[in-house]
């Protein structure tokens, strides 16, 4: 009757799988997204074109297709020996990086030009302008959307269950197939697990927002 | 030249430096592309045997059938989700507390659940033999909740004076909504609604995981049936062909959103109210379960 206590080990493994997948692909997405955002705002046209192409392609590709492309394409490009977990991290990280890039870029675009002009006119160097004037202001605008992107990422990890990764989605699939449990009860517990993860993420980002908030 | 927040208008030295960076990065990017193409070629992905299947009318017919299935699923899910979104948004804007609570709970719950988990539930519990309806209902519940949030924030973004003036001349709430608020809100919401429809279109590919015969599933089945040529399976050509179809579909739909956005901005009657839903907290579209999106 009690799905959770009967299969606690399975649930724990699935929960940890989802958390790990979320954390690692979030790290990859943040790094890649920042890099691509830097490309997109750079004065070098070639890099700008590359960044735009990356964002357009990835934002218009269904994640399932990207999973297929990564699981089948990377081994063909000679990356043999990667297990399905790391391939899933690659797919999720690349996909989310396109959205992170746009969040960061629109954060930078909301900083009024006058701020940077004022900084330059009092003699700040490029690095000082960027580090002390532009980025701190851009971060405040970019952090709430990045938070909801992270929540979306946590929910997207469920797709990895279709590609041989152990996480909550695959736990649900296995338990649904193993008859004897009420399918709705299984769903309820899976839902609770996801809600724990998403609430943690949104709590963390709210904390971050409060930390960075400025009384205006 | 408009100045940027990030850097000053380049002087002669900066111009030279930028040109050098440009050449270096262009070479690097072209090198990367060449490397990928070379790798694909050297692992035998461009052998004619893997590709000439796509020239048969039979194959093209199957791709077309898959495409039509995807579009049909998308059309049903899009209509149902807009309807559900309208109902839920009406509920959230209701004057009656219980109605508001129910609508808010439904919206928050379905927005917080990964779409795939919902689809697994529907497929295992309700629509065991009809994957299409599991997919359509799952998409409807999730996207309907997101659309509801878009509608609600669009209506709330109409300046307060509009509804106050309407009430002051004695209109009832229904009249205020249908006659004053909704017509103005729709103009500002339309781009967000269409972007969410792009997310719906992308998410139809989740049917692949529950073995529903939509476009991506056709592609996978097709690649599995093609006999390997010199030990190379036909998966990469499949990803390239079907990926292009998906990207073109989504780009077409997003360009409609951009076009609508430009049109509404150009309107002579002043710009529509600013859309707070521009931030991804509402349209966090990213595919799968988040949208967000995407």
Image (cartoon, coloured by chain):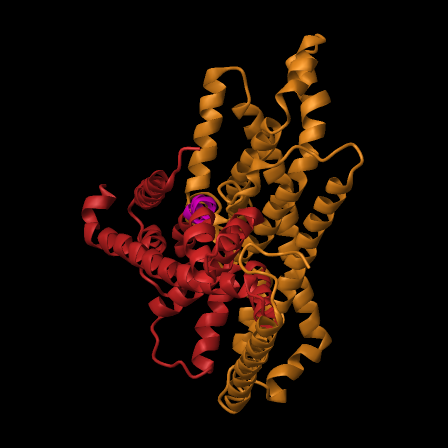
Chain colours: A red, B orange
Q: Which of these two is toward me, B17 or A183?
A: B17
What is the quadrant of residue B68 in the picture?
A: bottom right
Q: Which of these two is toward me, A16 or B20?
A: B20
Observer able to see residue A191: no
Observer able to see residue A197: yes
Residue A154, x across and y down, in percent: 38, 51
Q: How many marks?
A: 0
Q: Residue at x 46, y 40 (%)?
A: B111
Q: Residue at x 68, y 17 (%)?
A: B176
What is the quadrant of residue A185 in the picture?
A: top left
What is the quadrant of residue A199 in the picture?
A: top left
Compared to residue A165, the image places residue B287 above or below, namely above
Residue occupying the far right of the picture:
B268
Residue A133, x across and y down, in percent: 45, 50
Compared to residue A37, the image places residue A119 above or below, namely above
Considering the whole magenta stretch, tell me its main secondary structure. helix
Residue A208, x across and y down, in percent: 34, 43
Q: Residue at x 39, y 69 (%)?
A: A87
Range of magenta residues: A139-148
Q: Which of these two is toward me, B128 or A170?
A: A170
Q: Indicate the quadrant containing the C terminus of chain A: top left, top right, bottom left or bottom right.
A: top left
Q: Indicate the quadrant containing the N terminus of chain A: top left, top right, bottom left or bottom right.
A: top left
- Whether residue B182 is in magenta: the answer is no
- Whether residue A145 is in magenta: the answer is yes
């Amino acid at each position: 009757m009690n799905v959770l206590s009967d299969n606690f080990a399975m649930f724990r493994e699935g929960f940890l799988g989802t958390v790990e997948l979320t954390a690692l692909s979030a790290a990859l997405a943040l790094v890649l997204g920042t890099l691509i955002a830097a490309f997109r705002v750079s004065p070098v046209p070639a890099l700008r074109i590359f960044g735009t192409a990356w964002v357009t392609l990835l934002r218009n590709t269904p994640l399932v297709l990207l999973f297929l492309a990564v699981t089948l394409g990377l081994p063909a490009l000679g990356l043999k020996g990667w297990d399905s977990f790391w391939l899933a991290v690659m797919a999720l990280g690349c996909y989310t990086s396109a959205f992170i890039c746009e969040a960061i870029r629109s954060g930078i675009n909301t900083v009024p030009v006058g701020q940077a002009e004022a900084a330059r006119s009092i003699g700040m160097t490029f690095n000082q302008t960027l580090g002390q004037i532009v980025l701190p202001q851009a971060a405040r605008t970019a952090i709430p959307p990045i938070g909801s992107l992270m929540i979306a990422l946590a929910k997207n990890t469920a797709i990895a269950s279709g590609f041989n990764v152990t996480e909550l989605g695959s736990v649900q699939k296995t338990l649904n197939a193993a008859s004897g449990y009420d399918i709705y009860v299984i769903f309820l517990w899976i839902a609770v697990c996801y809600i724990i993860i998403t609430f943690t993420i949104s709590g963390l980002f709210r904390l971050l927002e409060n930390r960075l908030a400025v009384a205006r | 030249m408009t100045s940027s927040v990030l850097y000053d208008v380049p002087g002669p030295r900066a111009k030279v430096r930028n040109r050098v960076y440009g050449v270096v990065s262009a070479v690097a990017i072209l090198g990367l592309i060449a490397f990928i193409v070379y790798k694909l070629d050297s692992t035998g992905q461009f052998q004619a045997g893997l590709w000439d299947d796509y020239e048969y009318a039979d194959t093209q017919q199957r791709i077309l059938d898959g495409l039509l299935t995807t579009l049909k699923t998308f059309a049903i899910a899009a209509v149902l989700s807009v309807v559900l979104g309208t109902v839920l948004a009406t509920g959230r804007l209701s004057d009656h507390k219980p109605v508001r609570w129910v609508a808010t709970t439904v919206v928050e719950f379905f927005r917080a659940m990964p779409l795939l988990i919902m689809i697994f539930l529907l497929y295992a519990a309700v629509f065991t033999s009809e994957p299409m309806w599991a997919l359509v209902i799952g998409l409807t519940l999730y996207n309907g909740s997101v659309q509801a949030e878009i509608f609600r924030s669009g209506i709330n973004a109409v300046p307060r004076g509009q509804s106050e003036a309407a009430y002051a001349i004695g209109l009832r709430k229904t009249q205020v909504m249908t006659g004053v608020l909704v017509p103005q809100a729709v103009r500002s919401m339309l781009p967000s609604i269409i972007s969410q429809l792009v997310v719906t279109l992308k998410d139809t590919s989740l049917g692949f995981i529950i073995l529903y015969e939509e476009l991506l599933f056709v592609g996978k089945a097709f690649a599995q049936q093609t006999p390997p040529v010199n030990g190379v399976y036909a998966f990469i050509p499949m990803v390239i062909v079907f990926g292009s179809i998906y990207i073109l579909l989504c780009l077409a739909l997003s360009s409609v959103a951009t076009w609508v956005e430009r049109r509404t901005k150009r309107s002579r009657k002043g710009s529509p109210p600013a859309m707070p839903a521009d931030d991804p907290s509402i349209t966090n579209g990213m595919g799968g379960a988040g949208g967000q999106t995407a």
